[in-house]
Image (tube, rainbow, N blue to C red):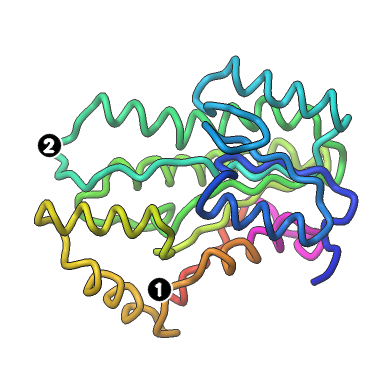
Amino acid sequence: MSGLLAGRIAAVTGGARGLGAAIAARFRAEGAAVVTLDLDGADERCDVADEAQVAAAFGRIGERHGRLDVLVANAGLVPPWRELTALDMAEWDRIFAVNVRGVALCLKHGVPLMPRGGSVVAMGSIMSERGAPRQALYNATKHAVLGIVRVAAQELGPRGIRVNAVGPGPVATEALHARIATRAASGLGPAPEQALADYDSETPLGRAATAEEVAKATLFLASDLASAITGRLLRVDGGLT
């Protein structure tokens, strides 16, 4: 898959670590000039929940590159598990601000830079289409992201801009390992080794997807290989049902 994004300008939010870093690396390997946005360690320091920061970051991208061909709205947070009756509404607002408002703001300020043929990929989840106990907040944000994607695909299609979402299942990033350890310590989940084994055993492939596999799926949606695909969620989950 050499050079699928040759000559294109791409922005990846949450691009300094985890899935965002894997996506940025894959895009660079495919010839894109990539600008990462994150709270630290990125090309552009940006809190995606802050409209002034988002507007300024995309303004600088426009000044430097003149356009934006690919936008990956990846930045997001995964909150702790909580029963519905124990929801922390301050936490609810904070997670929605990043996971949902952040996607909307990046579209608002990134899309004006995009020419015909541009592509947007938002970071959804398998939880964009399903529910799970004690995950109301995360599920709600990822359902909302998919809703935004479906609306944006309708609005931007006439301009020749495609909008899709990638939907990973569990991916063994450092952040997932940390969450598993926290859940185990609080009694809300099994021991870390068992939790990872459980994720693997739930899939027909017998293993969870990797960050690199999520990056490849994102590359597919961003590239011309997916030129007739818009408004869709592409699950990368080892076949979870």
Residue that label 1 marks: 240
Q: Is residue 171 left or right of residue 165?
A: left
Q: Which quadrant is home to the C terminus? A: bottom left
Q: Which label belongs to residue 86?
A: 2
Residue 220 is one of the magenta-drawn residues: yes
Instruction: State the residue at coordinates (33%, 59%).
Output: 177
The structure residue drawn at horizontal position 69% and vertical position 58%, both measured from the top left corner, is 221
Residue 198 lies left or right of residue 114; in this view the side is left
Which amino acid type is marked by label 1? Answer: Leu
Q: In this rendering, is residue 188 above or below 110?
A: below
Secondary structure at badge 1 equals loop
Q: Residues within 10 Å of mark 1 (few under 14, many from 20)?
A: some
Label 2's element?
Answer: helix
At label 2, which amino acid type do we have? Ala
Query: Mark 2 to mark 1: distance in Å?
Result: 29 Å
Q: Position of residue 29 (x, y in %)?
A: 77, 61
Magenta segment boundaries in residue numbering: 218-231
